[in-house]
Image: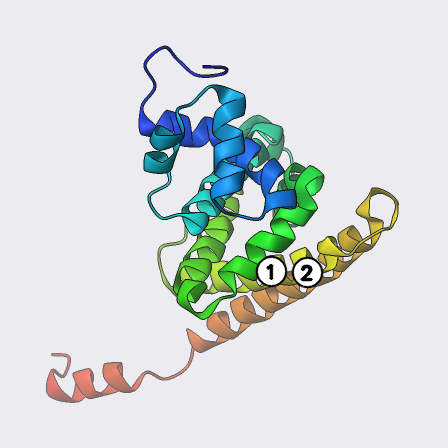
Amino acid sequence: MTNLPEDPTLDEIRAAMAPAVASNAAFDGWGDAARDAAADALGVDRDVAMLAFPGGAVEMIAAWFAQIDAAMLAALPPERLARMKIREKIAALVEARLDAMGPDREALRRALAMLAMPQNLARAAKLGWHAADVMWRAAGDTATDYNHYTKRTILAGVYAATVTVFLDDESEGFADTRAFLSRRIDGIMRFEKAKAGFLARGGHRPSLSRFVGRLRYPAV
């Protein structure tokens, strides 16, 4: 089996097959034909390949996205990201993710159409959240309070909008997509700055709970 150990696990088979499935999906769609063609190319038994993707098309898409995550992180190792400011990190991570998907834009278009189906919306939301989470963690985010959720929610929205532009971008080097992304990240940074200022001011405001506490337990 090409690119596989002698006795691979289903996880190893899934990971090895995912890019080939995506390449075939550009022509055959995310279905049995793309999976079987990828299996044949890698020397994987078709029945075993089917077991590797028990969730069908959505499972194939999720496996491909996982490989895109891996490619993104490989392109931007921690030591390289450490030299960047936070804005640069997020931009570089999104761009690296898009670069990894660039050769298979039609497969991506078909994947998004599949995920937009009503029965797949919940899984689509989880995949979008996961992509944002991987990027924020790579960027060094360690927030555990509500900032953890707001950052990922906002980035997931920015990423989804950027992908929409990317799919139809015919400019050289995807310049239009990169400009769109830059503007959206500027918006995130402005929001984070405004939020930080609001929270800082809020810390000096009278607290009703503290006031009630002092009434119940006066200082002695």
Image coords of residue 196 (percent x, y): 53, 66
Q: Residue at label 2?
A: 164
Q: Which label is found at residue 96? A: none
Q: Nearer the viewer, residue 201 or 55?
A: 55
Q: Quadrant of residue 98?
A: top right
Distance of label 1 from label 2 (alpha carbons): 6 Å
Is the residue 48 above or below the residue 118 in the image? above
- Residue found 54% across the figure and 39% down from its top: 34
Q: Residue at label 1?
A: 160
Image coords of residue 92 (percent x, y): 67, 42
- Residue found 53% across the figure and 36% down from its top: 21
Q: Nearer the viewer, residue 11 or 27?
A: 27
Secondary structure found at label 2: helix
Q: Are marks 1 and 2 in contact (CB under 8 Å)?
A: yes
- Where, quadrant-wise, is the C terminus in this rendering? bottom left
Q: Residue furthest top?
A: 6
Examine the rendering and report whether any part of residue 80 can be seen: yes
Q: Quadrant of residue 157?
A: bottom right
Secondary structure found at label 1: helix
